[in-house]
Image (spheres, grey):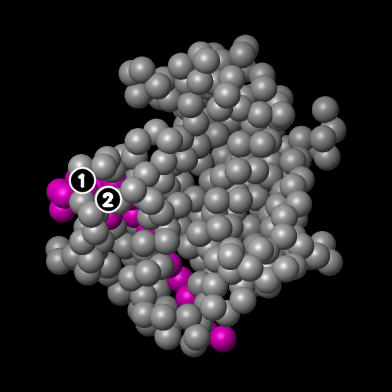
């Protein structure tokens, strides 16, 4: 298969209910689009959730790093490309490029995924699934942003404690990975987004949060534009960590 055939390309429009008060697509909606195109791309190549679920497997997102130079405005069309960069025994690296209506790259993302057994919840050897066919989709396409970093948070006092609510839950019965992103951005005052924009956003997922849990958010301020965040369920067990880096307008 040619390198071009290994890349999935998907078209979108920034709908009015998908933008924030600045008129730009929200990071949460962009995150949802990234997860959707990962699903479309996997499905078209025989590794979609619908097929995997029948075999008692599913994909889980482990890490996400998103770097943005701009975001689509209301009603603007844009394109998301996705491709597989590497496949290891227990993880695979998937990258994304977001192109504006002129075809210029305005954002990139790197992600790390694992496949798990839905009955045992343990990782699955990717090379043992479908005779290792997934390795045939590795694509040599550049993604010019840094890989997800190691995030460490020292703060012991939460800046917010939120109960898990209906809108947080996904089909698997735990908190949706994108909801963490939205909650983390809500930790910052509204006026902060008038003065600066998010340039880089990272997530590292560690464990699941269920309906009976609470989510406690801890934050370290690295500098005026750089923040590390940790989420613990019931203020004990880490479920995810995040890094938010702003750029001044």
Looking at the rendered structure, the number of numbered marks drawn on it comes to: 2
Relative image position of residue 95 (x, y in whole percent):
63, 46
In the image, what residue occupies the spot 60% across and 43% down?
36
Could one spot residue 83 in this view of the protein? yes
Residue 20 on image: x %, y %: 54, 72
Q: Residue 101, image x and y in percent?
A: 80, 65
Range of magenta residues? 231-249
Q: Is residue 121 above or below residue 99?
A: above
Residues 227 and 52: in front is 52
- What is the quadrant of residue 219 in the picture? bottom left
Q: Secondary structure at mark 1?
A: loop
Return the residue at label 1: 213
Q: Residue at x 68, y 71 (%)?
A: 74
Q: Are marks 2 and 1 in contact (CB under 8 Å)?
A: yes
- Element type at marker 2? loop
Camera-side residue of 17 and 249: 17
Task: Say which residue label 2 marks.
Answer: 164
Crowding around mark 1 (Cα neighbors within 10 Å: few <14, some 14 to 19, many 20+) is some
Question: Taking 189 as reference, is 54 above or below it?
Answer: above
As drawn, 189 above or below 234: below
Q: Is residue 247 magenta?
A: yes
> Residue 58: which numbered mark, if any?
none
């Amino acid at each position: 298969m040619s390198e071009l055939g290994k890349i999935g390309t998907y078209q979108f429009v920034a709908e009015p209910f998908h933008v924030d008060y600045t008129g730009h697509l929200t990071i949460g909606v962009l995150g949802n689009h990234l997860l959707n195109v990962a699903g479309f791309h996997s499905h078209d190549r025989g590794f979609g959730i619908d097929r995997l679920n029948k075999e008692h497997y599913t994909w889980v997102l482990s890490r996400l790093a998103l770097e943005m130079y701009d975001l689509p405005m209301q009603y603007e069309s844009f394109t998301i490309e996705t491709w597989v960069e590497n496949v290891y025994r227990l993880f695979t690296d998937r990258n994304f490029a977001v192109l504006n209506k002129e075809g210029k790259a305005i954002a990139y993302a790197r992600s790390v995924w694992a496949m798990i057994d839905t009955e045992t919840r343990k990782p699955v050897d990717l090379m043992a699934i479908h005779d290792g066919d997934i390795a045939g989709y590795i694509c040599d396409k550049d993604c010019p942003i840094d890989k997800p970093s190691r995030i460490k948070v020292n703060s012991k006092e939460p800046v917010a404690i939120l109960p898990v609510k209906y809108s947080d839950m996904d089909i698997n019965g735990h908190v949706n990975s994108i909801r963490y992103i939205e909650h983390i951005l809500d930790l910052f005052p509204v006026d902060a987004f008038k003065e600066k924009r998010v340039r880089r956003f990272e997530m590292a997922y560690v464990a699941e949060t269920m309906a009976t849990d609470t989510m406690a958010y801890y934050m370290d301020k690295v500098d005026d534009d750089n923040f590390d965040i940790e989420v613990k369920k019931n203020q004990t067990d880490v479920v995810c960590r995040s890094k938010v880096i702003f750029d001044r307008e």
